[in-house]
Amino acid sequence: MVGEVEKRGMRLGKYELGRTLGEGNFAKVKYACHLDSGLEFAIKIFDKKKMLDLKISDQIKREIGTLKLLKHPNVVRLHEVLASKTKIYMVLEYVNGGELFDRIASKGRLGEAEGRRLFQQLIDGVSYCHDKGVFHRDLKPENVLVDAKGNIKISDFGLSALPQHFRDDGLLHTTCGSPNYVAPEVLTNRGYDGAMSDLWSCGVILFVILTGYLPFDDRNLAVLYQKIFKGDVQMPEWLSPRAKNLIKRMLDPNPQTRVSMAEIKSDEWFNQDYVPTNPYDEEENIFIDAEAFSMQGVTVETEKDPGSPTLINAFQLIGMSSCLDLSGFFEKEEASERKIRFTSNHSPKQLLEKIEDIVTEMGLRVQKRNGKLKVMQENKGHKRPGSLSVAAEVFEISKSLYVVELRKAYGDPLLYRQLCSKLSNELGVREEILAAQV
């Protein structure tokens, strides 16, 4: 067990910590230099209390366990895991060229020769993972890093699956991944082959590399998923026929007929100037501090802040409706008879305060309880015309994007529509912002 990082010297054992390379909801990544060798590393720092609060201990154990197995030039390498009473430190290979996403964004798109070389490395890395029984399940350009020599490194294995995660039917059943890159069979909730779903994501990445835009995209999630299910990709004319052919075979919505890893490696376009990347020969004993997952003295929040929103992901958001045909889910729409939703960039605290101000100006009464609002107007005689009872609740999609749901218990439909219209117009997010964030 190592001591806590010193504030002044920013030291962690034999590592000197430097600038922050990235930061997420439950971890930050810092640049580090090994004091004896001078070698550069990236240290991913997890807060144990947040791990418990967010119930992500298993996800982090999975990432560490997965990276222990993987020793390939196109996969980010884990060197050791250190720990203190309050933190876990994953010492990782430092990749200084940024994300593949940034490279594509800066160039617009990559030429076929450069794009093919990166795609060949991606397939080599993914194929190696599959041979080891590891299925990534969240492949996208943001999770593919590029080093100083222009070679790729697959990262972020927090959603990966190992053989023990398969059910008796030999399939995976957890719905995960990123909406634009997720395979159609993952969305059906009937089980899926982890290798084939990874290959679909690789097909989306190849399309993005060569065109600079997504093959399936829509600001309305339901419409996006309908496009994914159809698998109807509109190919730009300037793509070579062989590249088009491989992309179409990878983006086959039927996993039974989708191109396999062996078929990709034998494809004529793929094989042009192909130099396979071989795994590392040497064995490295990875040190993992026994205290890494000791939670002694670390307490979990037993009560959630009443003002905190419920966290939901895109898949749960779709599940809030009884079917996938959610036309208009994120678009301006008339208030339905019982319930509407709209998105907002305001914080939950701001939303609840603004909702309270708006409905008060409308002459309505507000009750607050457990982070929810109840909007009421009572006339003489309960539930008579002119009465209204509406519940307002906020759900979190991402760090800066929220869904406000308004549910009518009973009341005047005209007043209800006026209330919904006023709230969505004053608090709702612009569609172009939503498209960028979902």
Image: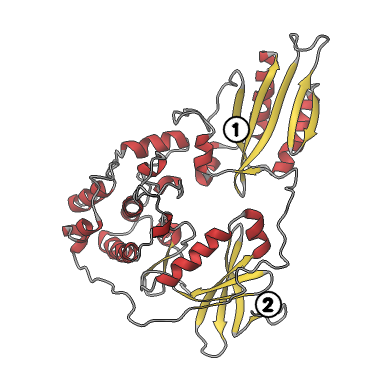
Figure label count: 2
> Which residue is rendered at x = 74% and y = 39% of the image?
371
> Which residue is rendered at x = 69% and y = 31% of the image?
392
Task: Name the residue that disc number 2 marks.
Answer: 5
Instruction: Find numbered disc 1 in the image and state the secondary structure of the residue it sits on.
Output: strand
Q: Position of residue 28 (x, y in %)?
A: 60, 65
Task: Name the residue that disc number 1 marks.
Answer: 342
Instruction: Find numbered disc 2 in the image and state the secondary structure of the residue it sits on.
Output: loop
Which quadrant of the structure image shows residue 351? top right
Color encoding of the figure: secondary structure
State left or right for residue 4 relative to residue 185. right
* Residue lying farthest to the front in this orientation: 168
> Which residue is rendered at x = 21% and y = 68% of the image?
274
Q: Between disc 1 and disc 2, whose residue precedes? A: 2
Q: Position of residue 27 (x, y in %)?
A: 60, 63
Q: Are marks 1 and 2 in contact (CB under 8 Å)?
A: no
- Mark 1 crowd level (few <14, some 14–19, many ≥20, 10 Å Cα): many
The answer to which of 363 and 78 lies nearer the viewer is 78
Q: Position of residue 46 (x, y in %)?
A: 61, 66
**In the image, residue 57 above or below residue 375:** below
Tell me the kind of residue under disc 2: Val
Q: Position of residue 209 (x, y in %)?
A: 34, 56
